[in-house]
Image: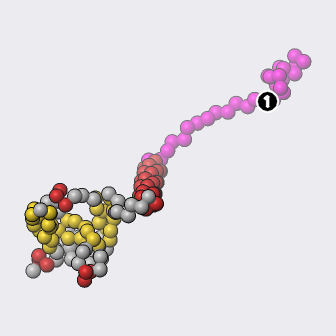
Amino acid sequence: MDSYLDINNNYFGVRHYKVHITKEKIKPLRFITSVISYAIFIWLLLVGLMLLAYVADIKIRAAKGDTSPPIYNAYVVLTGSMVPEIMPKDVVVTKKREAKDLEVGDIITFLSSDPRLSNIIVTHRVKAKLDIFRVYLLLKVDLLSLF
């Protein structure tokens, strides 16, 4: 039995091999690309989570009977009425605010009450603000201000 221990150097009869682990140097370009790819992945993951939370918020509020727009919303501008500032097909992210908090020069997005526009969502700049029993906003289109 002693000779068996001497040959294999353990009780189970398994030979041990000497293994040397060497650390491989990472090339700088490969390191930079891996960091950038991880950053893009994390950014896309966060955007996806935000979209999921946005849709979940809308669905939960709709199930409760609340049909008002959320605090933050995104719209695509379809026309060139705000051309110097906002181009057609730009995405406008809005935050819900009270009319009394708006200032002259702010750009707002709202549901038009004009019967000719049949409840279309419109984006315009506040030209003037009148406080007479209620807040009235005079709006202007940027494109027309060029002429």
Residue at image point 25% right, 83% down: 116
Residue at image point 25% right, 81% down: 115
Q: Quadrant of the C terminus?
A: bottom left
Crowding around mark 1 (Cα neighbors within 10 Å: few <14, some 14 to 19, many 20+) is: few
Tally the marks. 1
Q: Locate residue 12 relative to residue 74 in the image: left or right.
A: right
Report whether residue 105 is seen: no
Q: Quadrant of the N terminus?
A: top right
Kind of residue at badge 1: Arg
> Which image quadrant for residue 69?
bottom left
Query: Which residue is nearer to you in this view: 8 or 76?
Result: 76
Q: Which residues are magenta?
A: 1-28
Residue at image point 70% right, 30% down: 18
Query: Which residue is nearer to you in this view: 103 or 44?
Result: 103
Q: Position of residue 10 (x, y in %)?
A: 80, 22
Farthest residue to the bottom: give it.
Answer: 116
> Which image quadrant for residue 22?
top right
Residue pointed to by mark 1: 15
> Which image quadrant for residue 51?
bottom left
Task: State whether the magenta stretch is mostly helix, strand or loop.
Answer: loop
What color scheme is it? secondary structure
Disc 1 secondary structure class: loop
Question: Does residue 6 belong to the magenta stretch?
Answer: yes
Work out whether 118 lies above or below 10.
Answer: below
Report whether residue 38 is seen: yes
Q: Position of residue 12 (x, y in %)?
A: 83, 26
Q: Position of residue 114 (x, y in %)?
A: 23, 78
Residue at image point 11% right, 76% down: 145
